[in-house]
Amino acid sequence: MSFLNIDSIKDRTFDAIVIGSGISGGWSAKELCEKGLKTLVLERGRDVKHIEDYPTATKNPWEFEHRGQVPLDVRNQYPKGRGSFMREETIHWALKPNEQPFVEEKPFQWTRGYHVGGKSLLWARQTQRWSDLDFEGPQRDGFAVDWPIRYADLAPWYSHVEKFAGISGNKDGLPQLPDGEFLPPFEMSCVEDYFKGVLSKNYNDRPLVHGRCAHITEAKQIHNDQGRATCQNRNLCNRGCPYGGYFSSNASTLPWAMKTGKMSLRPHSVVHSLIYDEKKGRATGVRIVDGNTKEMIEYYAKIIFVNASALNSNLILLNSTSNRFPNGIGNDSGTLGKYFACHNYRGKLSADVEGFLDKKTDGKNPSNSYLPRFQNLYKQEKDFLRGYAVGVGCGRGLSQNRNGVGEELKENLLNPKLGNWNISTWMMGETVPIENNHVRLDTNLKDQYGIPQLVTSVAWTENDDKMVLDYIKEMTEMFTLAGFKNIRGGDSHSNPGADIHEMGGVRMGKDPKTSVLNEWNQLHECKNVFVTDGACMTSTGTQNPSLTYMALTARAADFAVKELKKRKL
């Protein structure tokens, strides 16, 4: 949508404003528009239209000029250590050089998706529900603050978003991993099946299950209505899926919101801050900097959903100062930006698998197997708090023979032989939020839009170190019992943020003195502002968090509209 008459306040006034168009922002837009609210969606990056703006989605390897490699002169333009998309097929998602510098007080990896759809085009698509073993964790183990909600509060909203998004998985009946509204799961490989049997025989608390992921394996009417098709098992997901086989804002929630006629989408809108009216005691709008012209523009609405992704949501709220809120909007508790956390993915272990040479994979599996958390589940048993889940993947590589001359060499290259099976695992550890792990605004440095640069001060703790050691010990034991050979790997020592699961800083809680948001994701002190992305998380759990963001967003939007109709907002 283009805004031609920006001088008119009427043209810049909406019922709701959503900041961000990623997983949580897309859900905010869908739910608010469906309920009849005229909604403006602000996205700081460029527009990305489903299908037409996935330039490499259907390219074959030989169609890339550099065979997938990014030329060195181009690669050198991007910040070091930020190479997640440094491939020819995904370079269009990489953050533009100098777009948003930040200050790493301690080493931190910040992956961003600045385009319409955000990281919903780039995520791993793993979707597990939380249980009360997660929501009750802080209270039981004495860290952070108690969550103001429990599983029963979120369960119907998990179902709501799962049916629409399309989640494949199996009903496993596990208390630590509640079942959901599942489409058929992807098949486990023969090695994963074998490993599952080994774990079942030797342990009573380690069930290996199908990974639950946001891929359509059997399209229902709701998916057909979205124009989405069954996953084609191409494993080219990060290029953007022209079939809509996996859930993204671009393929699903944003087009659905647009169909209502209630949504306006404005890309190139870098949010500067929220506008707070001292007399009304509420936020009245959002200031943006136009990404192209650098012009400051204000938009107004009755309710505001902040879904800019965890770090940017913290930044925006911290930068939203006024006489009432000199340290950031809603920050009476002084906790805004604090208790920031992410997941601990440092542990990696792989091994060679003997046998199964009569079997090979047919096609590709965009998911993996999953070992839910098993340590400290019901009581404290280890020398660290909380626990970790484990991702499990298996494959059979190719053994290419480059020997020979002429026809013999041609045959060897065109028809490589299958190699042996291998198995790889990675830990997904829960980190305990602490006050020292925080983000704040730099008092001197600003970016090109005149917005203070964010300072990240996040480090691993002794608890995280102990958890990595336990993962290595336990996985080595499991691999050994399975007869796997050449066990290798260990602690990758990756920096915080490498997991791309940033959480906290605007945490939910029961007490306004120790938290920023209430049980409905409202700012305690400014009720018409809602935060439902990763910033709202009180603790991290071990599960991939995106499904929980979706459910929290749908629940909060439903509440917001009801409160608006009651004239309470």
Image (cartoon, grey):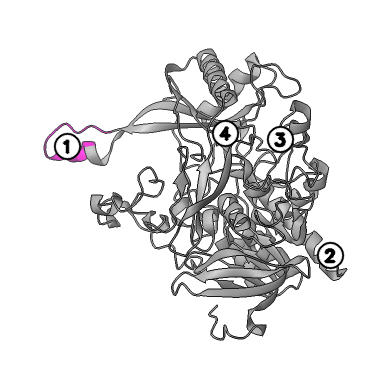
Pick whichever of labels 3 and 2 is earlier in the sequence: 3
- In the image, which residues are magenta? 400-412
Q: Nearer the viewer, mark 2 or mark 4?
A: 2
What kind of element bears circle 4?
strand
Quarter of image, res 89 = bottom left
Q: In 3D space, how far apart are the residues under numbered discs 2 and 1 (Cα atoms)?
A: 70 Å
Disc number placed over residue 409 in the picture, else none: 1
Residue 179 quadrant? top right
Label 3 CA crowd tier, 10 Å (few <14, some 14–19, many 20+):
many
Disc marking residue 562: 2
- Label 1 with label 4: CB-CB less than 8 Å: no
Q: Does residue 41 appear in this view?
A: yes
Q: Of discs 3 and 4, which sits in the foreground?
A: 3
Say whether residue 215 is visible: no
Distance Cα–Cα, label 3 vs label 1: 62 Å
Q: Amino acid at mark 1?
A: Leu
